[in-house]
Each structure stands twice: as C-alpha cells, then as structure tokens.
Amino acid sequence: MNRRGFLGLSLAMTAAATFPAYANSPSSDQDEAWIAVPDPRTEREKFGYINRKGCWVTDPIFDEAYPFSEGLAKVAIDGKYGFVDRRGRIAVPARYRRALSFSDGMAAVSSGPDRPAEGGFIDKNGEIAITRDRLIEILAERMLDPKHFYFRDGLLALNGKNANCLAITKEGKVAFRLADASFITHGFDDPSIPGEMERTRETSEFMGFSEGLAAIRLEGKNDTSRHRDTPKTAYVTKDGKRAFPSRFTSSGYFSEGLAPVIIDDERRSVIPVHNFIDARGEVALSSRFYLGADSFNEGLAPVVLGNRTMGFIDKTGRVKFEVAAEAALRFSGGLAAILRDKRWGFVDRNGTVVIEPKYDEVFQLGPNSRNFLPADKTIWTALGDRTTLIDATGAEIYSFTMSDGSRPTVTLSPTSRCR
C-alpha cells in the first residue's frame, strides 16, 4: 500500500515544476481542526479524527475518512460510503458504493447496478435531488460513474462527446447546451474514488463556474485562432451566452474578480505572456505581463518573473515581493508554498520563509482543493518514507513511515489527553 492509499484522504500532490494548469474544485472548509488519520492501536487500519493538538476527537471506527467539506465528511464503513457531521454522528447513512464530497450542497453518489435508483446527486439530508435516470436522460448516453462531478455556482458543468458541453441546475434541468465547445478541463486522479477509471474527457476535472463565469475551449468551426496549435478559449455566463469577445489562448479561473489568461496576439513571442482580466473581459493589469500566473487568493497572486524567480502581485500589478524558487502556489491561511531546489517550504505575506524548503512533497486538503491551510491550519508533508502532519509554524502533530512498503509505522501518534 502506498502513502496516499494509506492516508485514505483526498489529497492532491503539488508536484509542479512550472505553473500548474488553472484548475479549481471544491475546497475543504474545516472551521474546526478535525483531521482524518489512522489509529496505530487498531489491529486493522481504522480511521478517526484528531484536532491540531494531536488529540482524538472521534473514535477511530471508519474504514476510510476524508476531509470535511461544507460541514460534512465522507467516511467508509464496511465498504460503503456515507457522511458524518462535526459531532461524529452519521448524517447520511453509509450505503453508497462510491461518493464524492459535498460541493454547493450536492454530492455525487452511486450504489451500483443492483440499486440504480439510489444513484445520482444527494442533498445534505441524504435525499436524492437528481436521479441517475435523469442524468442519463439529459446526457442521452450511458451514464459514467461519478468522478469530478461537482456543482459550483448552482450549476454542474459537463462535457459530452463530439465537442459539446452542457450545464445542469440543481433541479435536474438543462441550463444550456453548447456545440463546438467544451469546458476547460484539468486531468486529476481522485483517490476518493476506489479503483482506476479510463481517462476520458468526460471524466476529467471541470473548472466549472466561479463568480458567474466559466471557461470553455472553442473547437471546430468556431476556432478562428491565428495559431492552430493553441485553440481559442472564451468565457460564458450561466445562461450559456458569451460573456465578452474571445481572444485568449488559455483561460483561468475567476477568483476575487480576476482571472489569469494568455491573450492571443499575432505578435506574441515564443514564450506566451500571461495577464489578468476582469469580469468585463478587460485586461486589468495592462502595463504588466508575466511568464506564468495563477489565480488570486487572499489579495495576492503568484506569477513567474524569470528563471527560478517567482513573485506575488497585488491587484494593481505591483510585485509585493520576489522569491528565489522554481514554483509557488497561491496564498492560503497567510502562507504560500514554494519549491526551491526541488524541496517544498512556505513563505508568509512578507516573503519571509517561515517553513524551510525541506519536503519532497506537500499535500492539499479537501476534494482537489487548492488551499493548503483551511481553518485547521495544518499541512501534510512527505520527506523520504516519512509522512508528517505539521501546523503553520512547522511543528509536527502526527507522522508515520512506510519503509516496509505495506503497513505504516507511526512515529508520532495522537493521544487521548485532551478528550
């Protein structure tokens, strides 16, 4: 069993040597410090939740346990998935063969071919909001197992076959369909779904809607880009209409009123230049161009300034600070991850290194979350065969090693002293 399989968490490794593709999915919202970890005292691997002091807050009774999202956490009991609340009580019974975490009040579930009526999307009461049969009817094709099916801004964005896409409301109605276009995707293997699925466009991760807009890739006859190797992208509103004229070869996710883009320009250099647009499609930082850029969070956005030089800018385009690093990720909880000499560490909002770059890997909490520090202020890290949960100061809370390749050896475990 590998490290991530043991964790049983929906963790996304940040192994980007350059800027990752623009992608976003529901974030973890641990307004209390509840972190899912295995219990070393159990004969079989059982999971429970600890707080950031390393103390158990629930009994370790689950076969699998995942981060909280919108107040509920996915857990597995006897091979079936359900959801628990922050008191450790079962909120949705464990009866599903597969499930995804909640986003926008909805969660995709599947009970298998023997119980098709229980598949589709459920609300937080466990009631079926959109049936599996309705999804099949909408898609007019065989329903795939739910993977990366997340509602955002009240809509579920889906790509169909033959370059078409559609959006579905929470009531199971089609908000719009578009031909010769597809929602921009970013491939991601979600370990919250047991087993591997064939990688297809239909099961990739969709950025979906954010702040009322979604990025799409124009295909076929609508592709009028001067550069055929870089198809144009555009933004659509929640009724499927083009938000503003398309002139982008790459489009990112709107956050805090801005989105990173690459503007299609016949005079462009070999290296694409990045900028930011506002909700009207206007270039927001007209005097600034970057070699790479990611979305804003907590008022700052990471940008590539040069070889092994990253910077963080404010919404005027002013570089607040530079840092020597090969890559940097968005701020979250007052910290941003940086990659220096192939090791990950963290800086604060002044650019001061507060956790030295020494980790092989750092993990993000939540279902494809881009935020390292939700309210629980903890980070999963890996160095060699040792995986460690640290707090925002770098202090260790919990750790284990996987040196034997199968069962972990816990080197720093939770206690019961604060129960």
Image (cartoon, grey):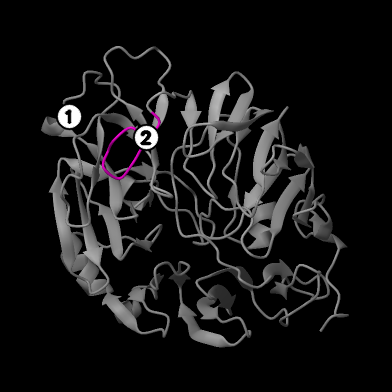
Q: Is residue 129 visible?
A: yes
Left or right, residue 355 beside residue 334: right
254 inside magenta stretch: no
Q: CA distance from mark 1 to mark 2?
A: 25 Å
The quarter of the rendered structure image containing the C terminus is: bottom right
Dominant SS type (magenta): loop
**What is the count of numbered marks?**
2
Q: Is residue 2 visible?
A: no
Q: SS for tag 1?
A: loop
Q: Nearer the viewer, residue 252 or 5?
A: 252
What is the crowding at mark 2: few (fewer than 14 residues within 10 Å), some, or many (at least 20)?
A: many
- Judging by the rendered image, the residue that carries numbered circle 2 is 284
Q: Residue at x 84, y 80 (%)?
A: 418
Q: Nearer the viewer, residue 299 or 263?
A: 299
The percent position of residue 237, horizontal first and vertical second, equals 22, 52
Q: SS for tag 2?
A: loop
Nearer mark to the viewer, of 1 and 2: 2
Q: Residue at x 55, y 23 (%)?
A: 305
The percent position of residue 202, horizontal first and vertical second, equals 31, 50
What is the crowding at mark 1: few (fewer than 14 residues within 10 Å), some, or many (at least 20)?
A: some
Looking at the rendering, the stretch of residues picked out in magenta corresponds to 277-285
Q: Which mark is residue 77?
A: none
Q: Residue at x 34, y 46 (%)?
A: 200
Tag 2: amino acid: Ala
Q: Residue at x 55, y 63 (%)?
A: 28
Q: Which mark is residue 223?
A: 1
